Image (spheres, rainbow, N blue to C red):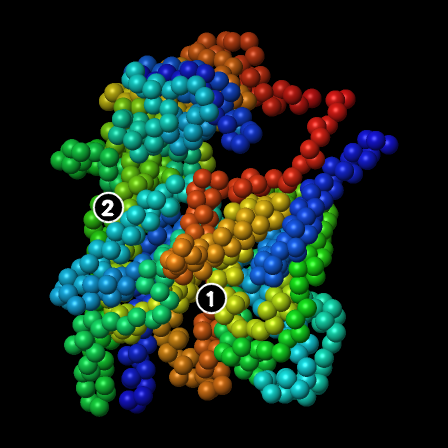
Amino acid sequence: MIGRMEKAARLIWPVLSLALVLVVLAALLSLGPMPLQRTATEAFIRLIVVIGIYIFIGNSGILSFGHVSFMAIGAYGSALLTIPPTMKKIVLDLPPFMTALQLPTIPAAVIAATLSSIFAFLIGVPLMRLSGISAAMGTFASLAIVYVVISNWKEVTGGASALIGLPVYADIWVTLIYALLALGLAYAYQESRYGRRLRASRENEVAALATGINVRRERLIAFVFSAFIVGFGGVLHAHFIGVLSSSSFYLDVTFITLAMLVIGGMNSLAGAVTGTIVVSVLGELLRLIEAGFDIGTVHLAAPRGLREVGLSFLMLMILLFRPQGLTSGREFAWPIAPRAG
Amino acid sequence: MTFVLQNIVDAISLGALYALTALGIGLIFGIMRLINFAHGELIMLGAYALFFTFGMHEAIMGLVAMALVIATAIVMERVAFRPLRRANPATLLIASFALAYFLQHLVLLIFGARPKSVTFLHELSGFFVVEGLRIPKLQVVTIAITIVLLVGLVVFFRRSSIGTQMRAAAEDFGMARLVGVRANSVIAIAFLLSGVLAGIISLLYVVQTGTLTPRMGVSLVLVAFVATVIGGMGSLVGAAVGGLVVGVLTVALQAVLTVELRPYRDAFVFAVLIGFLLVRPQGLLRGRSARERI
Amino acid sequence: MLATEDLRVTYGNILALGGVSLRIEEREIVSVIGPNGAGKSSLLNAIAGVVPVASGSIEFEGQAIAGTAPEDLVRRGISLVPEGRHIFGGLTVAENIRIGAVARRDRGAIDGDVDRVLAMFPVLRERLRQPAGKLSGGEQQMLAIGRALLARPRLLLIDEPSLGLAPLVVSEVYRAVADLRAEGVTILIVEQSATRALEAADRTYVLASGSIVMAGGAAELRAEEGFEDAYFGYKARDP
């Protein structure tokens, strides 16, 4: 009986510990001033995106530069489903039924994330044939295509001008809950036989193929699933900021989310969480320095760009000196040593 | 007729610029299987060097820019990529991405995000008028420089000992070391050459647009990626041909697409990249070394 | 000339060589035989600096060389002809031969050495301008050996020279090996097909599962009880 409980504890600890960290962080930060809460909310949204990206990159070992496109589709999808018709009429040029359509936020979110998944499936069927550099290039090209389309499709996305009028509902608690859900789903996937098969192919593709694993199919499953989570992150981003512009779904987010994953360690869920927290905290500190502070009557401020310079420098250092990331690609293990026998 | 000819000249000169960029990336890829995102930032740095030295004699401006770009390329290899040489291509790619981001924002930190403008070699901004055809002098210069560089590179790779060593290393790096080719030397020389190419593009680019932003290298590098894939990753001739093809493709799309579709031109270009990856991953030209080194 | 002491090589968790000690004297031909996966290639690759040494030492002409880069070992006089030849298919035959001399300083003597290689393997002479990728397997093997010779090695390591070659071509390769020794080159050959290597060599080590299980001259080994067993170890376990 105790043995079984310990076994269960061992299984669930890696995700439970991470969840506890998030809950404690949220509880503490929710006591802080509004700007801090907003920073925390943004970090939770990033976390959802990073967890989503991790589901694919971490388990498959295939690099993707394209996941931010799923974020964009989630964000714009949910925007189209939730912006009030009167507003849509002014800023967009949609078919009448789309203009009239307005859904409650949660169904809209699920549909939008599903759209991301469908898109991921469509591009994944061909792209999952690729690996290594080709996969990175292919996913990058898909990101660029989505970006070009969103930036120019005036009728549907508003094009170069920002899309406004989204209901704002994503606060620290809402994003915490979704982050916990994403965490749980990612862990469940990784421990499922699908996840295990994909991880086996990450370690040794030839051996995995030899044991009958359909590597392409397993990758596609992870790709589509991860697109759902990332898409959901995009939805929350949309309903956190309330305004969408295509430039927020391109290289900057791609860089920062990849930086989070690399710094934390891209082979473990703990790495995704650790990386997001570390980068968010560091980014916030650097942003404070950028904003400047007063010493007596002198206002000192670092020039813009310090945050990005600092983060990319840290990322390079991690790649050079700790290529497996801060967590070394391991999950947090149950702290009590197994009893002998 | 004039319209067609004008477009052909446009296509070739644009293609030449892309070809030079793609060559700079293809050189490094061939030798160490690294797709160097930061190549665009080399070009950007050269442009900012022109901005920084503006007012000096133009020859000095050009030399300083070239020197800075080449030095950065070599330092980049030494500091960031050499320690990662045994890492897998994906790690190298991420590192170059981070490096690109680092350099971009370093420049942003120093010069700010606002676009800067600088005039350089103003006399190249005129036109040659031939039979009613207005050909920008710069286009002629770009094409000429590209031809000279291509011929120079071919001679270097075919005739010189170090060129042969680099071809051998591009084919089978491990074996090249076994016969005594110095890994550090060939890689350093590859970066030096890619720095030279990037520096020349800096100059041409500034003459052409006169406007600089910290992000200016990104779009050029993305196009060059398309070119290297189309031409065949790891093949230098392929990179040059790929650059030309992308130039022609871009100009052709611009001419052929309807007004509504024209803004999506780049999306079509990237779709071609995906198409090549899927259907003809070896590219137009052999690209025998497209398989990754393990 | 060459001595390894308790040499160990690992790939991740896998032990490829578990403490190999061997000696090669100047002007000897030594062969290492053993079944597939015994660690033969790992041994050569470790000596040539291609794979890192986990522990133990390698001494060449009295100096420790473990951890030295392959391009530096060539300059010290060790050349490896790897399994699968690894000729540069896109380079011409002539370029392949000449690239073997990159490590040398005595530019003047290179032309003469190229001629000697072409005299040793006349088939290559007719194909000097062709891409090396167009050569047959046997020609590629000769080219690979010729390329290694251009470095003027004092110790030549050859990995599976007869793999995939017709018997007649194999004879030619081994004739070249004998000629080389006559010129003062020390040779270490690794082979899976024992007969030829055993006959050509002064001494032979038998490697199995990463360790030396037997050593001696051809006659000694043949007389030794269990030689067949050790060499065909995997067969012996079959009922």
- For residue B249, above or below residue C9: below
- For residue A39, above or below residue C229: below
> What SS does tag 1 mark?
helix
Closer to the chain start, of discs 2 and 1, is: 2
* Separation (CA) of disc 2 from disc 1: 32 Å
Name the mark on residue B55.
none
Q: Residue at x 29, y 36 (%)?
A: B180
Residue C159 showing in the rendered view: no
Q: Is residue B60 left or right of residue A319?
A: left
What amino acid does circle 1 point to? Leu
Query: Of A300 and B242, which appears nearest the observer?
Result: A300
Q: Residue at x 82, y 34 (%)?
A: A4
Query: Of B160 and B31, which appears nearest the observer?
Result: B31
User: Pointers 2 and 1 in contact (CB under 8 A)?
Assistant: no
Chain under callout 1: B
Query: Of A26 and A142, which appears nearest the observer?
Result: A26
Residue at the spot of label 2? B162
Q: Residue at x 64, y 84 (%)?
A: A87
Q: Residue at x 74, y 22 (%)?
A: A340
Residue C165 in the image, given as x and y percentages of width and height: 43, 35
- Choose top left, top right, bottom left or bottom right for residue A290: bottom left
- Choose top left, top right, bottom left or bottom right for residue A121: bottom right
Residue at the spot of label 1? B273
